[in-house]
Amino acid sequence: MWSCLHVIMVGIMKIGIFTESFLPQVNGVVTAICNSARVLSKKHKVEIFTVGRGPRKAAGCMVHRFRGMKLPTYRDYKFFIPGRRTWKLLSNTRLDVVHVRSSLPFGLIAMRFARKRGVPLVGTFDTPISDYVHYVPVLGKIRIAKGLLSNTALKYMIWFYNRCDVVIAPSNVAKEWLKRAGCSSRVVVVSNGVDTSRFIKGKVDKRLRGKLCPDNGLLLVHVGRMSGEKSVDVLLRAAKNLKAMGTEFKLVVVGKGPVLASLKQMSRSLGVDGCVKFVGFIPDSQLPKYYASADAFVTASTVETEGIVMLEAMASGLPVIGANAGATPEIIKNGVNGLLFGPGDHKDLVKRILRLTDARLRKRMSANAVRVSMQYSIKKVVQIQEKIYKQVVRIKN
């Protein structure tokens, strides 16, 4: 009861964010956690509980770290290893609400902690883990075993979210997916948000622009994890066609991941290594100038539950070209702030890219992109999160 009175009277909550993905790993989930935690921590006490080595303070919050093991098929990811020390570290922790960003083993720790303390459990559905079982060593590569793993992962994930007091989905597509899969918990659509203050339209870094695109053609940028499900190979096939047509362009690919080496090899095999530049990992502080110096953002991913990089690009004034799949059409309003193409169809992608060689069209879409991105401002998102936290605390108490 005191926890509830404390929240209502003082307005300050003790929020625990449990996640297996966190710094130094960099991906959309980590970006979303840091963005919201940075804003939340100005008003509330926020602590982050995660796996593996890394900074003990981030986004204005204390970070508590537990043992983790690297997956041999995806070495950036740390898999939680339970141990007696886990509960010893958590024994003195007092929270008003637990927000879990992973349904995997560390999610079970968050669930058990919430039950033992009698505090509400809020879960965010970021990724359908059933689509990522190919990262499981050996078994994930065998078709029959992969199917069994996927089915088991789906059942587990729905079992997990059905035990949350409320589930946050970053898009309507994600919410509908959960409901179709059997989620009976209350599901609320709340964007992961974007820190719009970091991205400024028109702030071109001329030196960087000249280095990336010396012939002053169309500069396209893609930012993301270099993994199979992101379909970067579709961008490379489109680049081959554009080159064959004599189009002046450069495609800059930002990010690292398990398929980066094979994508570079594919680029050489297709003969587009002269117009495609893989720049690898770029520190978060440097990303804004890459966005601002480009003409458009492109992605062929079909698995997005939202797509933070698209929001960042839009906040930077970039039209976005994306696959008409997943949650991408919720962000890209075709012909308004960007263009949609058929999933996996590199020839259709080429048509959309050629449309953006029209500078006047780019200018109009650029203004619309900034306007639409403001709807996803992290400050607006955090206000909604706060309301959800307070609602579940009142109900629980």
Image: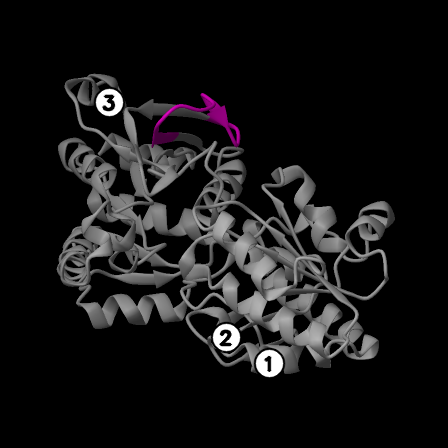
Do residues under tags 1 and 3 come within 8 Å of each other at their CB atoms? no
Do residues under tags 1 and 2 come within 8 Å of each other at their CB atoms? yes
Q: Amino acid at mark 2?
A: Pro
Can I make out residue 382 in this image?
A: no
Asked whether 129 falls inside the magenta stretch, the response is no
Determine the image quadrant of residue 126: bottom left
Q: Amino acid at mark 1?
A: Asn
Q: Quadrant of the C terminus?
A: top left
Which is nearer the eye, 51 or 151?
A: 151
Determine the image quadrant of residue 89: top left
For marks 1 and 3, the one nearer the N-term is 3
- Locate residue 208, reporting x and y percent: 80, 47
Q: Mark 2 — residue?
A: 329
Q: Amino acid at mark 3?
A: Leu
Q: Nearer the viewer, mark 1 or mark 3?
A: 1
- The span shown in magenta is 48-61
Q: Quadrant of the N terminus?
A: top left
For marks 2 and 3, the one nearer the N-term is 3
Q: Secondary structure at mark 3?
A: helix
Quick one: label 2, few (<14), some, or many (20+) residues within 10 Å? some
Q: Is 258 left or right of 369, judged from the image as shown? A: left
Which is nearer the eye, 383 or 345?
A: 345
Tag shown at residue 334 = 1
Tag shown at residue 90 = 3
For marks 1 and 2, the one nearer the N-term is 2
Gap between marks 1 and 3, in whole Å?
48 Å
Q: Is 350 left or right of 327, judged from the image as shown? A: right
Can I make out residue 208 in this image?
A: yes
Quick one: label 3, few (<14), some, or many (20+) residues within 10 Å? few
